[in-house]
Amino acid sequence: MRRGLLLLVAIVVVMVMGVVYYALDPSSSRLFPKCAFLEFTGYKCPGCGSQRAIHALLNGDVVAAFKYNALLFISIPWIAVCIYAESQRVRNPKLYLRLNSQLLIWLFLIMVLLWWVLRNIFNW
């Protein structure tokens, strides 16, 4: 019962956030926080542009979403598969263990770090 309630609350929160991100543009609304790392250093962090990318995706602008944060854009299928694997953890433990293997975690970390460095070198 408690798990079902938590799932329902999570779904409602995600839907409300989706409506907010659909309706309001993070680049022009004061409701959304600015990146502290960018503000202090002048360099983009791996997540910079994610809010704008989500807004663009929800409004159907795939090209703009990719330009705002390519890492987020290409990570969406991976995130979906990981959420599925988590939900099927008991029924399909092999999938869960494969997706949470040390190798894949290290590869994802390397990808994030490369994205962080390359986006600042090439101003992506």
Image: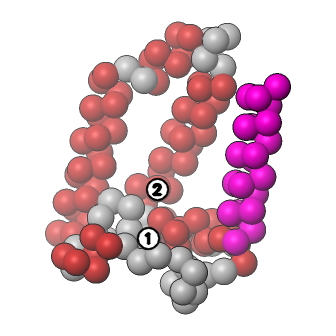
Q: Please name the colour scheme applied to the rendered image.
A: secondary structure
Please give the name of the residue rendered at 54% of the width and 16% of the height, measured from the top-left corner: 95
Q: Amino acid at mark 2?
A: Leu
85 with respect to 71 (left or right): right
Please give the name of the residue rendered at 45% of the width and 17% of the height, measured from the top-left corner: 98
Q: Main secondary structure of the magenta part?
A: helix
Residue at numbered disc 1: 49
Q: Earlier in the sequence, mark 2 or mark 1?
A: 1
Quarter occupied by the N terminus: top right
**Residue 22 visible in image:** yes
The tag on residue 22 is none
Q: Amino acid at mark 1?
A: Gly
- For label 1, the SS is loop
> Does residue 51 belong to the magenta stretch?
no
At label 1, counting other C-alpha atoms closer than 10 Å, the crowd grade (few under 14, some 14-19, many 20 or more) is many
Task: Look at the picture and state if 52 lies above or below 98.
Answer: below
The tag on residue 72 is 2
Task: Look at the picture and state if 94 lies above or below 38.
Answer: above
Please give the name of the residue rendered at 28% of the width and 75% of the height, measured from the top-left corner: 38
At label 2, counting other C-alpha atoms closer than 10 Å, the crowd grade (few under 14, some 14-19, many 20 or more) is many
Where is residue 71, by image quadrant?
bottom left
- Judged from this view, the residue extending furthest toward the front is 2
Instruction: Look at the image and give the residue range highlighted in magenta.
Output: 1-20
Spatial separation of the CA atoms under disc 2 and disc 1: 9 Å
Marks 1 and 2: in contact by CB < 8 Å? yes
Where is residue 63, by image quadrant?
bottom right
Quarter occupied by the C terminus: bottom left
